[in-house]
Image: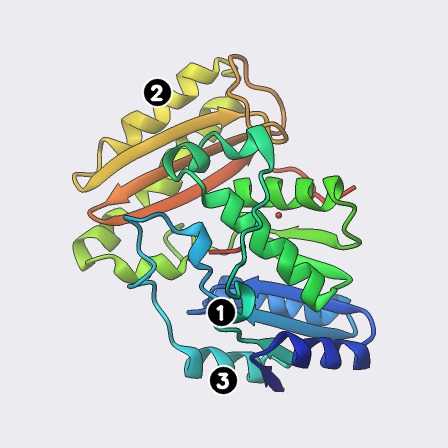
């Protein structure tokens, strides 16, 4: 496995590869990331991964400086997983002196995570566009846990005619339902014990939907009521939205996206479910 810190090295490696699967990450890898690598390995002739904690998608009061990092462990896991090359740039490699470009993907970035984290998705769209241009993959793999990011990446590829097939794979969960995330490492033992309430709240709303409830506000109230059972959980938002536009719904439709963000102390967790579970979408998009 080649570890390549520069754009020039990646472009040279890309010329030697055929159909390439790409998994962009911010490192501190877990089983969710590795499931994307495994799928890319099964579907593509070669696999590339990027490890880059992208500063432009963090706000001034967010966790850039303390975001978990363990490059040595990450590289060992990727080597064992059969990855062909890993792009490990420093920020100055991606954003050299004088860099000013930013990609605004419009209305889908202003709601949910975008409302809570202004500028976040401009940072995501810009770095993903750069990574796609540098790595030039045939397919790129993202996790459903970051549902809004996947919507943004699909629109980026569509609107800018980027020749990449975006694959969105199911969320990988712990045994108690908590969606795997690098930020789970921030949780205290007490917070970790309560964190499964996020998935439980989503599941409670899905149960109502399965029983015939179609009032979106009723599903939102059910999610909030369930979160309220956890002493340490502080909801940021709960949403029942159109899965393409992310506009909030009054009446729940098949394929609607349930999503939420919940804080446990300084740690903010996100998760989502699709109603009902739908076939994996492909374009016709960064997993954090």
Residue closest to the far front? 98
Mark in the foreground, 1 or 2? 1
Closest to the observer: 32 or 61? 61
Do we see residue 170 in this rendering?
no
Residue at label 3?
76
- Alpha carbon separation for disc pair 3 and 1: 25 Å
Q: Residue at x 75, y 41 (%)?
A: 158
Q: Toward the viewer: 88 or 268?
A: 88
Q: Please say if the residues under marks 1 and 2 sit with CB atoms less than 8 Å apart.
A: no
| Residue under label 2 | 221
Give the quadrant of residue 40: bottom right
Q: Which residue is mark 1?
A: 92
Tell me the CA gap for discs 1 and 2.
45 Å
- Give x and y (percent) for residue 176: 36, 53
Q: Which SS class for mark 1?
A: helix
Q: Secondary structure at mark 2?
A: helix
* Mark sitting earlier along the chain (1/2): 1
Q: Quadrant of residue 43?
A: bottom right
Residue 97: percent from left, percent from top? 50, 64
Above or below, 219 relative to 192: above
Under tag 3, what secondary structure? helix
Residue 121 versus residue 202 in the image, above or below: below
Q: Is residue 24 visible?
A: yes
Give the answer, above or below, for where 246 lies relative to 113.
Answer: above
Mark 2 and mark 3 lie on one chain; the one further toward the N terminus is 3
């Amino acid at each position: 496995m080649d570890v390549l810190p520069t754009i020039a090295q990646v472009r040279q490696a890309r010329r030697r590869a055929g159909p390439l699967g790409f998994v962009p990450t911010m490192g501190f890898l877990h089983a969710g990331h590795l499931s994307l690598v495994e799928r890319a390995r099964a579907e593509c002739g070669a696999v590339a991964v990027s490890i880059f904690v992208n500063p432009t998608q963090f706000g001034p009061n967010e966790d850039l400086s303390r975001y978990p990092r363990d490059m040595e462990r990450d590289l060992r896991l990727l080597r064992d997983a059969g990855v062909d090359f890993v792009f490990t740039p420093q920020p100055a490699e991606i954003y050299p002196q004088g860099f000013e470009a930013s990609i605004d993907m419009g209305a889908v970035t202003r709601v949910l995570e975008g409302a809570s984290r202004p500028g976040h998705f401009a940072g995501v769209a810009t770095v993903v566009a750069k990574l796609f241009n540098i790595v030039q993959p045939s397919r790129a793999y993202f996790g459903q846990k970051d549902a809004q990011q996947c919507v943004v990446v699909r629109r980026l590829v569509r609107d800018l005619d980027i020749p990449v097939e975006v694959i969105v794979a199911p969320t990988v969960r712990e045994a108690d339902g908590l969606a795997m995330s690098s930020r789970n490492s921030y949780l205290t033992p007490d917070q970790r014990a309560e964190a499964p309430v996020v998935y439980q709240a989503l599941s409670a709303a899905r149960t109502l939907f399965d029983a015939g409830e179609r009032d979106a506000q009723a599903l939102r109230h059910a999610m909030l009521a369930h979160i309220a059972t956890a002493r340490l959980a502080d909801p940021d938002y709960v949403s029942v939205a159109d899965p393409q536009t992310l506009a909030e719904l009054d009446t729940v439709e098949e394929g609607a996206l349930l999503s939420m963000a919940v804080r446990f102390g300084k740690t903010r967790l996100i998760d989502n479910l699709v109603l009902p579970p739908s076939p994996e979408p492909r374009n016709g998009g960064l997993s954090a």
